[in-house]
Image (spheres, rainbow, N blue to C red):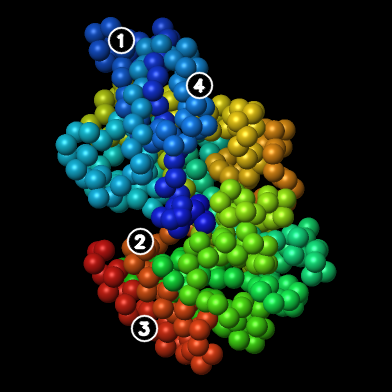
Amino acid sequence: MRTTSHRRALSLLLVAGLGLVAASCGSGDSDEPGAQGSGSADGKVTITVGCQPPKSNPKERAGWDEDVAEFQKLHPNITIESKDAFPCINPDTFQAKLAGGSQEDVFYVYYTDVQKIIKAKQAADISEHVGTVKALSDIRADVQSVFKDGDKTYGLPRNNYNMGLVYNRKLFTQAGLNPDAPPATWAEVHEAAKKIAALGAGYVGFGEYSAGNTGGWHFAASLYARGGSMVADDGKSAAFNSAEGKAVLENLKQMRWNDNSMGSKQLLQWEDLMRMMGSGKLGMMIGAPDVVQSVNNDFQGKFEDYGVAAVPESDGKASLSGGDGYMFNPKASPEKIKAGLLWLEFHELTPGKGQFNYARAKTQGRPVGLPIPDLYGDSKPGQEIVALRKQYATVPVDHFTPYVTAQTSITNKLEPPKAQELYAVLDVAMSAVLTRRDADIDKLLSDAESKANKILAKNT
């Protein structure tokens, strides 16, 4: 749901600014849009692209301008007009922009909205042209599948992440734990959490959300890692009232009331755990690698104090994933689609260019070394990107090794339909087990299932 911390702060975090656009390009090559006289009479084509970094983010915007200039030299027949509205996509205005003709030719989208947009025929089928993207076959199949419906393709990814276990390496050392061997099972989490909580007043071994839809979000993350599902395959009924769902709540109830390793302050929302992690008093929490960046940038933490591993017991199962990318206006001409694909390939998919220009990011003082986005896995472009991250790293790359190593055996799994509404329902169950010793887990899940089924019925 967020880039972890970030789709909360993706619904609460992921929204943050990526960008695109403002250039000119082309060449006499026959693969260029307009090269055969299509498009305008002079063979040129202009496209609008959404999500240019805003002025409030001057470093990324400056990098964007540099990329535009480079792209113009490569493709002088294409002009890209930047659109930097924030947030990059707003469900309240999306329909109006599309109907009014102001929707960008290449527009930004969250993973969770892609299939709705496809079913509503609000994006162009780019299948005929997407084969021109050289690295297409190297993109992770589960990532590219987000933008597919059957054998048709409607967009390309820009970001991909999944959840993990964020932990404080400094506290692990203080508690006599090995920070290079983080917990791989929930039993190991329990033991580590108890040792961290025993460090003294104010120390919390493991923290969890239970309000503001964040509790339900993390319930989904833990459920997926256990092999469970939030909804049935047809999307019409809830599936979380299961052995896996019960195990999620039983696990938290034990840590809260038997182990006393979660602290007494509960009903926590996104910023609460981030603040606790930044203060150096929280040992572990569920979150993606971008949590570490947010804790460093916004909550007085230090990159070197944190590490990330896989969600416990997710090996061979799934991890709640998310990300974003770009789709094409259904009214975009073939020439605009081909031009947009050239830009996306350059800026979002090429090692050493655009978002992967880590040499520039290091010069700008931006963090380099986080293992996201993960678009390519262990394919050749993926290996090149990993090598560049290590070459220009400004953060301790090795601290993410447990997370990276685990990805080869974990399947990305997207948020369920009606995610925010389901998360709100499951906040009730999460808050109950963390605030009431006598909470009835079976009843909590049964009540949540009934409410979720009513929500999902509206989706059919």
Q: Verify CB contact (< 8 Å) between mark 1 and mark 4.
A: no
Instruction: Give the CA separation, mark 2 to mark 3.
Output: 19 Å
Q: Verify CB contact (< 8 Å) between mark 2 and mark 1.
A: no
Tag on residue 417?
Answer: 2
- Helix, strand or loop at disc 1? loop
Instruction: Give the CA separation, mark 4 to mark 2.
Output: 39 Å
Label 4 crowding class (10 Å Cα cut-off): few <14, some 14-19, many 20+?
some
Instruction: Give the CA separation, mark 2 to mark 1.
Output: 43 Å
* Residue name at image x 60 percent, y 86 percent: 257
Whichever of callouts 4 and 2 sits on the residue coming sooner in the sequence is 4
Instruction: Give the CA separation, mark 1 to mark 4.
Output: 25 Å
Whichever of callouts 2 and 3 sits on the residue coming sooner in the sequence is 2
Quadrant where the C terminus sits is bottom left
The three-letter code of the residue at mark 4 reads: Glu
Label 3 crowding class (10 Å Cα cut-off): few <14, some 14-19, many 20+?
some
Q: Which residue does the numbered mark 3 point to in the structure image? A: 447
Q: Nearer the viewer, residue 188 or 132?
A: 188
The three-letter code of the residue at mark 3 reads: Asp
6 to the left or right of 95: right
Q: Is residue 243 visible?
A: no
Residue 402 in the image: above or below residue 282:
above
- Helix, strand or loop at disc 3? helix
Q: Verify CB contact (< 8 Å) between mark 3 and mark 1.
A: no
- Residue 26, by quadrant, is top left
Q: Which residue does the numbered mark 4 point to in the structure image? A: 66
Tag on residue 43?
Answer: 1
Residue 384 in the image: above or below residue 73:
below
The three-letter code of the residue at mark 2 reads: Pro
Whichever of callouts 3 and 1 sits on the residue coming sooner in the sequence is 1
Instruction: Give the CA separation, mark 4 to mark 3.
Output: 54 Å
Label 2 crowding class (10 Å Cα cut-off): few <14, some 14-19, many 20+?
some
